[in-house]
Amino acid sequence: MDTRPAAFVIPEAVPLELETASIGSRFLGLVIDWSIQGALLLVLVIIVANTSVGWVGTTLVFILIFLIIWGYPIALETLWRGRTVGKVALGLRVVTKEGGQIGFRHAAIRSALGIVDFILSSGAVAVLCVLLTRDNQRLGDLAAGTVVLRERTGLRRPTPTTFAAPRGLDAYAETLDLAGLGPTDYGVVRTFLRRRCGLGSPPRSPRRSPSGCSRPRPRVSRPSCTWRVWRPPIAGALSGRRPWLRSGCAPPDSCWCAD
């Protein structure tokens, strides 16, 4: 089953789309956590088998069993911001439906309903709930109001790239007024920045520019240079004042050349 984007509205009323965890990744994370819990239970059984315990010791053993089975996920998800060892290994995290950090109440409800999700139904309830819900939630998630998200994907994280103005035009780039640029203008500049190194001289010529592309018009006097020289200062100004304007790779100095 593929992951699905989940829509969240944070308290600042900003909608976010985050990637929910699939059944496969959640199952592998559970296997890791169950292996750790099984190893702890095995150590406890070995210790009890080699020692003589009375009723006090027996009570303590039952308390330790409870802590290993239910206290392990509750403590880790509460103190580790919705993560356990298995979730960290698979790049998963439990968050609230609003995208916030879960607390003890959320972790306790999820762990308690794990009895129905995994023990009583042998995992059938959990699988059916994940398949039938929009945000891949099991019964414990539905009751606690939580979602399991993927923090780590195979995609490379975008890295911001800065573009320096050509030598001698730094002062001019600082005087550019970008207030009049709209979304279409930003799109044109972004497209140019992403393709600049692969464009030859003819496509860069202002006579070959695509129709309908609005060219930025600064309110200051334009220096006596061609459009090919004029675009880099705008790129430098945009990269400095609009950090979210990103490109795939940092350009070499040879890309900014003037004719």
Image (tube, grey):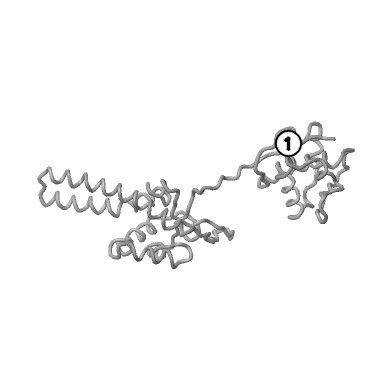
Disc 1 crowd, CA 10 A, few/some/many (<14, 14-19, 20+): many
Residue at left offset 30%, top offset 52%: 71
Task: Tell me: 55 left or right of 155.
Answer: left
Residue at left offset 18%, top offset 47%: 45
Count the marks: 1
Task: Please state the horizontal and vertical placement of residue 36, each as a whole percent of the image.
Answer: 30, 47
Viewer-closest of 106 and 3: 3
Look at the numbered disc 1 and give the secondary structure of its residue.
loop
Q: Is residue 43 above or below residue 120?
A: above
Q: Is residue 38 above or below residue 112?
A: above
Q: Give the position of the C terminus as an image quadrant.
A: top right
Residue at left offset 44%, top offset 52%: 93
Q: Give the position of the N terminus as an image quadrant.
A: bottom left
User: Quadrant of the rendered structure where residue 252 is?
Assistant: top right
Inspect the image, locate mark 1, and give the three-letter code of the amino acid beneath it.
Ala
Viewer-closest of 50 and 207: 207
Task: Please state the horizontal and vertical placement of residue 105, each as a whole percent of the image.
Answer: 38, 59
Task: Tell me: 209 left or right of 30.
Answer: right
Residue at left offset 37%, top offset 63%: 126
